[in-house]
Amino acid sequence: MFEYAPAPESRSVVDLKPTYGLFIDGKFVDPSDGGSFKSVNPATEEVLAEIAEAGSGDVDRAVRAARRAYEKVWGPMPGRDRAKYLYRIARIIQERSRELAVLESLDNGKPIKESRDVDLPLVAAHFFYYAGWADKLPYAGFGPNPAPVGVAAQVIPWNFPLLMLAWKIAPALAGGNTVVLKPAETTPLTALLFAEICQQADLPPGVVNIVTGAGETGRTLVEHPGVDKVAFTGSTEVGRAIARSVAGTRKKLTLELGGKAANIVFDDAPVDQAVEGIVNGIFFNQGHVCCAGSRLLVQESVADRVLEALKRRMAQLRLGDPLDKNTDIGAINSAAQLARIKELSDAGSAEGAERWSPPCELPDRGFWFAPTIFTGVTQAHRIAREEIFGPVLSVLTFRTPAEAVEKANNTPYGLSAGIWTDKGSRILWMADRLRAGVVWANTFNKFDPTSPFGGYKESGYGREGGRHGLEAYLNV
Amino acid sequence: MTATATSARSDLSELGRSETALRTFLHGLPGVDQVGAEQRAAQLGTRSIKTTAKAQAIDLAIRMVDLTTLEGADTPGKVRALAAKALRPDPADLSCPHVGAVCVYPAMVPYVAEVLRGSKVHLASVATAFPSGQAPLEVKLADTRAAVEAGADEIDMVINRGAFLAGRYQEVYDEIVATKAACGDAHLKVILETGELATYDNVRRASWLAMLAGGDFIKTSTGKVPVAATPPVTLVMLEAVRDFRAATGRQVGVKPAGGIRTTKDAIKYLVMVNETVGPDWLDPDWFRFGASSLLNDLLMQRTKLTTGVYAGPDYFTLD
């Protein structure tokens, strides 16, 4: 046997403070009327830091600071000068990427190989990409001189804390807007380190404000009358509430919500690569991915072969310490999320689907869930309909391409889909019919700042990324 | 599983009897997606192998080296020195294992055989008009027999790439079968020369063809064309031996050759073996490295691990 010795990434690159304030108007400040909450390492349940909780007074201060910066500094600033700041931020992120990656894994529980090789390179790429647009907005296709929107209220989830921050802040700043961003309450630390990077880059005060807190802070922020634009990534349930509260106001809104994506494997698929795509589709980031390929639709004639290969591959997945460079599956982000995954998985068993996990030892402390597949799932099962947001795959079969399309589209969501076949014409035929914002062909979970991302139906509206991502932050 | 494996075995043995059957079978294998295969190989290359795992991997890699010299300038003196090194790679540390085999041209086999006699180091010889394979079959078979008679217990043959690329699978198959017969008891490694096959689909088909025809090992390259072993090519070949064993019950070895020069590279290949085909192949009987300069880098890293300091290149023998 070839046992890999532990290969932990060093924690010492991260300088954790015991407490963090709010980042308002270029400075870290104490909350005026709020309390505090703790952010824990989900792999160990160790408390990492105490975080300020922003109350309505703090949110108001942040929005006012953003408004001042928008009117006095950032809005009037020529695009080429805004670009300089964005490029500077992008470079600092690259320089400090190791520190950011370790902190992200500590706070979120995701494996260091993902924060290091996926999250951080994409974060820097987003800032570089939108920095390039800042002085070229007349050429973005939104008219000769598109104006910014104003102050953006941005609420982001815990699954890709820093990456979602980049998706929100980079296009907003490139377009000349200022922002007040609320990171998720379980993963605020990289956003606060990003605030330090804004200071390091000499970004004018008030352009970026970070207010930490839970749902109530988020609600106060999106409902604040001084906000011109609301951008939210998270659950469909909260997205609905935000849409209701924004309705009838002048605020622009983009929502990126849940998903229940189909990953469709045809009988002529490259099997070994399809299996990699299935694994990447559902086990990447513990399945905490809104566009995860959580429903595997496999052609019945090859289902046994594909499942055998999938199980063999799953037995190779290494679950454990997120900071170990050989870990494939890290910790579930929170006790609440773990409870939800358990509840839906139990429902899967109770409704008669067959559950399978590879032999897998879970650590004693922290929040963990073994990679799991359910076979014999039908469209009527809860695990085929509801978003689990965990490392749980539901396997369904189909007979014909038309049936695959029908089943893939038979969901209230429509964020992404995957197609695996050697036949190019079938990829195009399928892509025309799948009601999903992103369709991947012979790959899955590929992201690029130049490519727009967003959903159909209850997966939300608006697009992030690419030229399309600028639209939400321009007065068009 | 046993019942299906048995029936599959008899089915597959019939394939070599007709060009049509061979073609239908080989073109019916699942395709390989180039981007996906390369991405998987790159991912496996990011494993971090440290401390005890690294020490274990280095010793295993040394035992898997086919220490190779295939030059026009090879002389009895040169190959004797290489054989001596194969037996005792690190004269300063007797705990260092010997390599898997020495690999030379047929004319050099007798000199190596003298040195290796009585040891457990295998003696491999390239044959069949290596490296191009462009010679009449009788010449190739005579080349093979001569090498075996001179003492080689492993034969590294080249497939007829011209015939393969022209779609004459039966011809390639028959040549391998004939060479295997000429080998007698010697193990047959079949060199696919993947750099000339160009696509991963071809690599998978050639791997199956070589295994169906009776090859004991499939090997990537001669080392004589610009593109030699690469991680994705080796990955596709490992998947082929894994699937072949599942279908037939027979285990076939894999040998990447050419271009593997550093301990880091070698460990990446071992990780790939471990996570693709598993521990059954983590043995010199089932996985080899065709290499020359790799050995000294393995020895340097081994010394670094045991002593804590890097020794200069002058502390390792050049042969």
Image: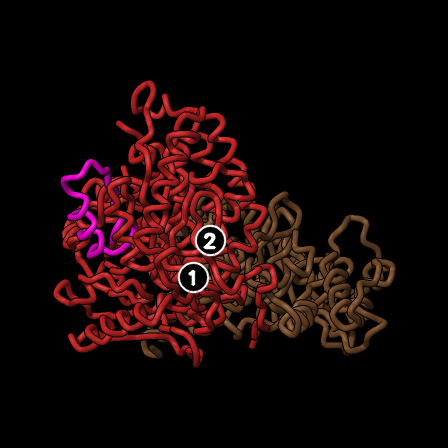
Chain colours: A red, B brown
From this view, report whether residue A151 is shown above or below residue A18: above
**B62 lies left or right of A456:** right
Residues at marks 2 and 1, CA–CA distance in whole angstroms: 10 Å
Give the x, y percent position of residue B233: 52, 53
- In terms of depth relative to the viewer, which is nearer, B61 or A21? A21
**B43 lies left or right of B260:** left
Camera sees residue A395? yes
Give the x, y percent position of residue A24: 43, 47
Residue at image location 29% in from the left, 62% down from the top: A389
From this view, report whether residue B45 is shown above or below residue A228: below
* Amino acid bearing label 1: Ile
- Element class at badge 1: strand
Can you identify the residue that label 1 sits on?
Answer: A51
Proximity of marks 2 and 1: CB atoms separated by less than 8 Å: yes
Camera sees residue B181? no
> Do marks 2 and 1 share a subunit?
yes
The image's mark for residue B7 is: none
Q: Magenta residues?
A: A233-257
Give the x, y percent position of residue B269: 58, 61
**A270 lies left or right of B118:** left
Can you identify the residue that label 2 sits on?
Answer: A192
